[in-house]
């Protein structure tokens, strides 16, 4: 009997050890969007390995993603209106709905239960149960006389309290959808945002929402702790002294930075990064850069800001040292650097180099390239650490 029990114990120990070898956490996983093939790569950011390719995501030419609170699931927002839930552990699609005709990003609520999608067509925002992708709420962005028109929606972010904030391109408004009391949202409409808000950012506290304006020379700020928030113009006429350059690609305010008491914002139609004081929201300076910036993203410790550019300068990345406000390095990763994503503590940054069909990993201290991974026309790179950050 003792020998039998000993043999059973040894067998169970071996089975447990084998199971432990096959288990893994999700904290060092990420995805790379392959915009040319409707697919994504699941990557291990510690080992610099591609674990799997997941196909069947539709049009991901402008795709973005958010993650479940447990970091197991990625929710991918496709340009064709597709919302796809991808299981990073089983490496397959868990659920998918085509909820609109032309989508432009989304967000997940702070409690992880709701996924919201922003739509160009037919306009408005749709909100889904994160577990099932069942429709929870449909919020048409109706405006104008008799609310007869529908607006494109942009700048959709999550803020604390089970709320979403988004702006209306056609109406020049920002709306707050409050789901704190259930699945029927309370909508707050804020008029007077400005002409054609094209993108927006929210700070890590969820308090400050800034919308960029394509139809005006400036931006609009909302203090979401106000009740109701009152629009405030900032950086008005920041291009008044210089003719605006052609805009080959719109900057992404989502790729902004907040470091050392300053917001670093990519300018529209100017080869500059704009500095804004985070208390007064007055202009605090400008940094001339190589081209028209698209993303200006900070290393997690706030010491560096990495900037990439619109065509024809999109083979270049520049690095700003925040304390000195000086460009300290100019890198040439290759043709069409579309996106950047920092490791959670900032020791590395991953770059998608679309026209070289590769993703590059760079050491942010030595500024040396660590490894290159093949990818089919890569664009967005998103790591699971985003699951625990407001506004991403």
Image (cartoon, helix red, strand yellow):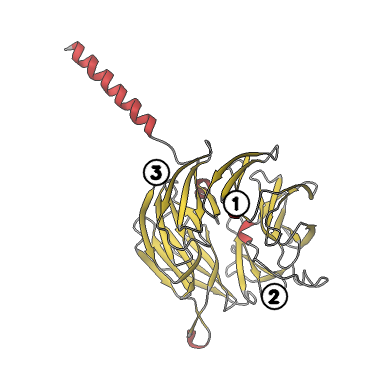
* Helix, strand or loop under label 2: loop
Label total for image:
3
Out of 96 and 148, give the one closest to the viewer.
96
Indicate whether 351 appears above or below 105. Answer: above
The residue beneath circle 1 is: 356
Furthest-front residue in this view: 356
Tell me which numbered mark, 2 or 1, is placed earlier along the sequence: 2
The residues bearing labels 3 and 1 have C-alpha atoms spaced at a distance of 28 Å
Cα–Cα span, label 2 and label 1: 36 Å
| Residue that protrudes farthest toward the left in the picture | 1
Q: Residue at x 58, y 75 (%)?
A: 169
Q: Are marks 3 and 2 in contact (CB under 8 Å)?
A: no
In the image: residue 323, left or right of residue 108: right
Could you say whether the residue bearing mark 3 is in a helix, strand or loop?
loop
Of the two numbered discs 2 and 1 in the rendering, the one whose residue sits closer to the viewer: 1
Q: Nearer the viewer, residue 269 or 163?
A: 269
Q: Secondary structure at mark 1?
A: helix
Tell me: 89 left or right of 273: left
Q: From the image, which quarter does the N terminus lie in?
A: top left
Give the number of the disc on residue 89. 3
Residue at 24% x, 14% y: name it. 6
């Amino acid at each position: 009997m003792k020998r039998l029990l000993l043999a059973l114990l040894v067998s169970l120990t071996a089975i447990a050890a084998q199971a432990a070898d096959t288990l893994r956490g999700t904290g060092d996983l990420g995805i790379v969007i392959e915009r040319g093939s409707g697919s994504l790569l699941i990557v291990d950011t510690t080992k610099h390995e591609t674990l799997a390719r997941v196909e069947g995501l539709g049009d991901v030419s402008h795709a973005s993603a958010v993650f479940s609170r447990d970091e197991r699931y990625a929710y991918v927002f496709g340009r064709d209106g597709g919302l796809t839930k991808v299981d990073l552990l089983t490496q397959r699609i868990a659920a998918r709905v085509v909820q609109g005709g032309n989508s432009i990003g989304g967000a997940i609520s702070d409690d992880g239960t709701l996924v919201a999608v922003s739509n160009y067509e037919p306009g408005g925002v749709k909100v889904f149960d994160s577990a099932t992708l069942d429709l929870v709420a449909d919020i048409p962005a109706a405006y104008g006389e008799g609310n007869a028109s529908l607006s494109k929606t942009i700048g959709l972010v999550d803020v604390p309290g089970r709320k979403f904030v988004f702006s209306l391109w056609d109406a020049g408004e920002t709306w707050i959808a409050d789901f704190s009391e259930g699945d029927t949202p309370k909508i707050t409409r804020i008029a007077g945002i400005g002409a054609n808000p094209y993108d927006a950012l929210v700070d890590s506290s969820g308090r400050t929402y800034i919308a960029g304006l394509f139809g005006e020379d400036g931006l609009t700020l909302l203090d979401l702790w106000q009740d109701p928030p009152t629009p405030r113009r900032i950086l008005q006429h920041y291009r008044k002294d210089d003719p605006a350059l052609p805009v080959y690609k719109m900057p992404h305010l989502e790729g902004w930075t907040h470091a050392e008491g300053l917001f670093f914002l990519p300018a529209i139609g100017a080869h500059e990064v704009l500095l804004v004081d985070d208390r007064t929201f007055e202009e605090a300076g400008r940094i001339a850069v190589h081209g028209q910036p698209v993303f200006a993203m900070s290393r997690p410790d706030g010491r560096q800001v990495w900037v990439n550019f619109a065509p024809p300068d999109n083979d270049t990345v520049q690095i700003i040292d925040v304390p000195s406000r000086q460009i300290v390095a100019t890198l040439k990763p290759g043709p069409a650097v579309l996106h950047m994503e920092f490791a959670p503590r900032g020791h590395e940054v991953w770059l998608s180099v679309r026209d070289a069909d590769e993703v590059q990993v760079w050491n942010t201290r030595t500024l040396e390239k660590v490894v290159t991974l093949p990818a089919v026309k890569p664009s967005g790179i998103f790591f699971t650490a985003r699951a625990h950050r407001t506004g991403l």
